[in-house]
Amino acid sequence: MSSEQNDTGRRQATMRDVATMAGVGIATVSRVVNGKPVTPDLAERVERAAESLGYRQDLTASSLRRADRRTSTLGLVLEDAANPFSAALHRAVEDAAAERGLLLLAGSTDEDPVRERGLLRTFAARRVDGLIVVPTGQNDTDLDAARRAGTPVVCVDRRTAAPQVDTVTVDNRAGVRAAVKRLNEAGHRRIAFLGDLRSIWTAEERHAGFVEGLAEAGCVLHPSLVRRGLHGAEAAQEATRGLLALPHAPTAFVSGQNLLTVGARMALQELGLQRRVALIGFDDLPLADLLEPGISVIAQDHGAIGREAAGLLFDRLGGEAGPARHRVLATRYVARGSGELPPPEDG
């Protein structure tokens, strides 16, 4: 019970207040607010009294009294909530949680392992029932500690070295290999690659797919056309400018991340080359189909990723044991024009 004041300065109603007004015992009020069966007339009296008094249940206190210590909350650790991928993933997990009456708490790491560790520990302190994490790859011990403490953990988008942690990823290598094959079949031989930070698992996988794609197509890998360790649109924009200034400039680009794709397209438009140099980006972008030409992408199904991750987490919360599971979802190619451009005749 609480006797704290609300934001109007008035004392907040307590369970005892509701019981007095309804003419029932505190135990009856407790059963009603916690969804346990009582007779319809008692439930109606308690609900009317609670509404009249403006009573609000203290969920934190209720969770501490529950035998299973559940708080009906989940934690979601994202790379950047402003990134379209993270935003779509957030919404998918939020919808899945809402269907089960769970509250979702979320935060961004900005690829900072210190910030990631802080979020993991904050969510643990708030006793979330489970965690869904886009890991930086540098806090596997913290993920393992959360799991060993009894909090189920599911990693999305990236693998983790933490044992017994379920993961959901897409087939990054296959998606990039297919993109390289398309560009090669269109006539491109000098294909550049823009990659994110090397510490990121997906960045390594997508670069590996690029190398494999060139080998399968019989194309030469030109190290001078590969730029890795980029993070953000501005870094990609600068890298693209530099590549296009080379004596033997690339005729096509494969971008390994959506913000890198934005930077590459900005550089192409600055130079008036968006209709001469091909571009395929990994992951879709808002309004990518409204540009001219539209940006061709290797698309991920964000909703499916979020639903799959939530499903694995709910399995663990339901008591399912066993070894770690890794779900791999397919990507799909979306042709919008930029990836279908042929090389220039003088290229």
Image (cartoon, rainbow, N blue to C red):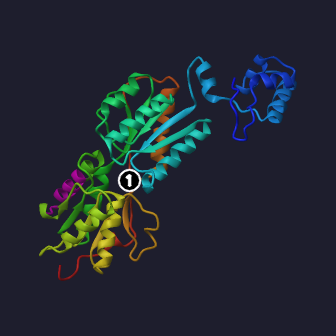
Q: Residue at x 33, y 70 (%)?
A: 265
Binning the other alpha carbons within 10 Å of mark 1 as few (below 14), some (14 to 19) or many (20 upward) gives many
Is residue 274 something one can see in this rendering?
no
**Residue at 43% over, 68% down:** 288
In depth, the one of 249 and 76 nearer the eye is 76
The x and y percentages for residue 141 are 31, 29
Q: Main secondary structure of the magenta part?
A: helix
Query: Does the stretch in magenta take in 21?
Result: no
Residue 326, picture quadrant: top left
Measured as percent of width and height from the top left, residue 11 is found at: 74, 32
Q: Position of residue 38 (x, y in %)?
A: 80, 21
Give the magenta part as a residue range: 207-222
| Residue closest to the far front | 9
Q: Residue furthest bottom?
A: 346
Report which residue position mark 1 lands on.
331
Report the amino acid beneath label 1. Answer: Thr
Q: Taking the image as drawn, is residue 334 in sight?
A: yes
Residue name at image x 20 percent, y 73 percent: 244
The image shows a total of numbered marks equal to: 1
Residue 148 shown left or right of residue 41 in the figure:
left
Q: Is residue 308 above or below residue 31?
A: below
* Residue drawn 32% across the image and 65% down it: 280
Relative horizontal placement of residue 105, taking residue 296 as reference (left or right): right
Taking the image as shown, residue 339 lies to the left or right of residue 317, namely left
Figure quadrant of residue 267: bottom left
Please determine whether, in this image, residue 247 is positioned above or below residue 28: below
Q: Pick the quarter of the image with the N terminus.
A: top right
Q: Position of residue 40 (x, y in %)?
A: 85, 26
Task: Tell me the quarter of the image containing the C terminus.
Answer: bottom left
Report if residue 216 lies within the magenta region.
Answer: yes
Helix, strand or loop under label 1: loop
